Image (spheres, rainbow, N blue to C red):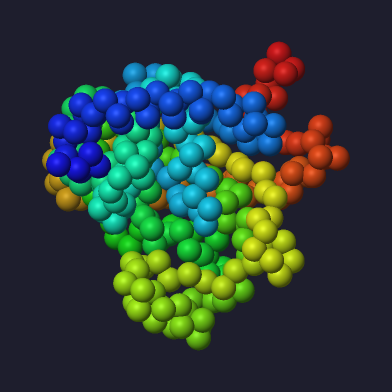
Amino acid sequence: MHVLTDTDAILNQPPRVDALRRAVETVADAVTPAIEAYRPYVEGLENLPRDGRFLLVGNHTQVSVEALLIPFHVRRVIGKRVRSLTDRQFGRMRGPARDLLAAAGALVGAPEPVRELMCRNEPILVFPGGGREIPKFKGEEYTLRWQGRAGFARLAVEHQYPIVPVGLVGGDDVYRSLSRRGGSWERFSAALTRRLAGPPDMVMPLQHGIGPTLIPRPQRMYLRFGAPIDTTQPARVSSEKWVATVREKTQQSLERILAELLDVRAEDPYRHLNPLAWRHAISPPEAAGALHG
């Protein structure tokens, strides 16, 4: 049995995994001041259904910080652990790494365990682009690479599970890509990936951080939770048509969130985490309202 794929193991975790889960939550609580010190821009938390019955659909960035920030903020607001769907290649992991992923709530994005979690009204997080959305060639920053994937929409419709789109901006600017897709570097990287038996959709671009180095560029993170999308199927609309409609609505909503966050970031003097601009950092509308209320 594998704790990332077996339904019973996911819902009734072994004592060692349960102990790790408590440790992970303790660490998450302890690092809260450190996260807040960087003043991430977070808005739309009021859109989260308080019963925890929703499917979060997000975008992957190059550093995948969204996989940590989204569950962190959801747990702070509704007090529930988010179950993140991960790629099948991670489901083949063994040992401590597997247990740590399971403790953090991760499970392989297979239909049966997801159905079981939905029956139990648990908050779930999915990135439809999967691993292929992480490496970004020049010009691909903050673009979705779903490649027609609609499994998340199908399961949400099947269980009338609300979808909450959640977008993150900042993670694709920690590193800058020098190569474009379709060029000689992609062909070289693809050949190297095949030789190393790596995933064919994880071809890495040529990148740099600060200057010519791989030192990460300091970037503020911008996170927004959108309004829930109702997945209840209307009468006289076929299941396939409605699944396609829900998928399209989700993608459009997420793309709109990313575009709006890019606009917010463009006006923010604190976007590069410059401490001299800390007091002038743009705040979310609800936070600004609370300050002036």
- For the C terminus, give its image quadrant: top right
Q: Is residue 101 above or below residue 76?
A: below
Q: Which of 14 and 287 is in front in this view?
A: 14
Q: Nearer the viewer, residue 173 or 150?
A: 173
Residue 7 % position (x, y): 16, 36
- Name the residue located 38 percent from the left edge and 58 percent from the top edge: 131
Q: Can residue 234 be seen in this view?
A: no
- Number of residue marks: 0
Q: Nearer the viewer, residue 241 or 23?
A: 23
- Name the residue located 37 percent from the left edge and 29 percent from the top edge: 20
Q: Nearer the viewer, residue 94 or 9?
A: 94
- Name the residue located 45 percent from the left edge and 43 percent from the top edge: 67
Taking the image as shown, residue 150 lies to the left or right of residue 111, namely right
Q: Which residue lies furthest to the top in this view?
A: 293
- For the N terminus, give its image quadrant: top left
Q: Quarter of the image holding residue 11?
A: top left
Taking the image as shown, residue 106 lies to the left or right of residue 76, namely left
Residue 93 % position (x, y): 29, 51
Q: In this view, does 113 lie above or below 18?
A: below
Taking the image as shown, residue 96 lies to the left or right of residue 258, namely left
Taking the image as shown, residue 148 lies to the left or right of residue 279, namely left
Q: Is residue 131 visible?
A: yes
Q: Quarter of the image holding residue 221?
A: top right
Q: Residue furthest right?
A: 276
Residue 262 % position (x, y): 62, 50
- Name the residue located 40 percent from the left edge and 23 percent from the top edge: 22
Residue 135 % position (x, y): 48, 63
Q: In this view, does 172 lie above or below 14?
A: below
Q: Quarter of the image holding residue 161?
A: top left
